[in-house]
Image (cartoon, helix red, strand yellow):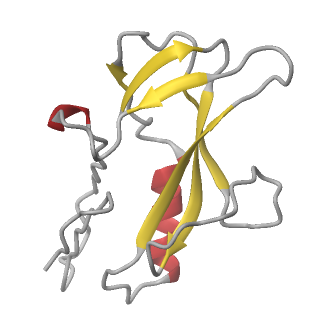
Amino acid sequence: MTVVRTFAQWDADLWILGIKDDSGPILEYSESPSGNPEVVKLEDAIFDYTTSNRGETVTSNPVSGLTQYLNSFYEANPSYAGGKYLFLRINLDADIGVNEQRYAISATESPTASERPKLNLYFQDPAANPSQQFYRVQYGKNAPTAP
């Protein structure tokens, strides 16, 4: 994702809110421990005070918790054939009463295509040929429906 630091001394973490059946808004944004086992921190300090105030592309670590989270989902749902939504969240660390954290993250509505967030999935070659493979990445309020 493209991030511009407008002011920040602290960092921002990447969290997952879960995998859902629809794209309706999620009203719980609490950090763990919230009592909700679907709210999991995937990566600590995905960007921080060293992030450029002119903007830069920030990527998650390939060994972040997202890989393990998705693997666990597929292991628990071996017959999954698509149609769910992955909800990610950036949570700014806060030191109450010290400094407000400010980052601007480009959204899908950005007029500059290269600044829109992207989700690239990588996989290891399977030991045996699977009968089917599915790839669907969709984001934004006007994203097209995959076939």
Q: Where is residue 34 in the image (x, y as percent from the top left)?
A: 81, 59
Classify the position of the N terminus by image quarter: top left
On the image, which quarter does residue 49 sit in?
top right
How many tags in the picture?
A: 0
Question: How far across and how far down the image is residue 44, in percent?
Answer: 62, 34
Could you tell me which residue is drawn at 61 percent across and 14 percent down?
8
Residue 39 pos. (x, y %): 67, 59
Q: In this view, does 13 lie to the left or right of 80?
A: right
Nearer-the-camera pick, 81 or 7: 7
Q: Which residue is drawn at 45% across and 78% down?
A: 22
- Residue 93 on image: x %, y %: 71, 30
**38 or 55: which is nearer to us?**
55
Nearer to me, 140 or 82: 140
Instruction: Give above or below for 146 relative to 142.
Output: below
Q: In which quarter of the image is residue 114?
A: top left
Asked whether, in this view, residue 114 is left or right of residue 65, the answer is left
Residue lying furthest bottom: 79
Q: Is residue 142 left or right of residue 84?
A: left
Q: Which residue is drawn at 82% across and 14% down?
A: 98
Residue drawn at x 60%, y 60% is 17
Q: Which residue is outermost to the left?
A: 147
Inspect this view and state whether residue 44 appears: no
Question: The C terminus is located in which quarter?
Answer: bottom left
Quadrant in the picture for residue 61: top left
Residue sitting at the far right = 97
Residue 70 visible (yes or no): yes
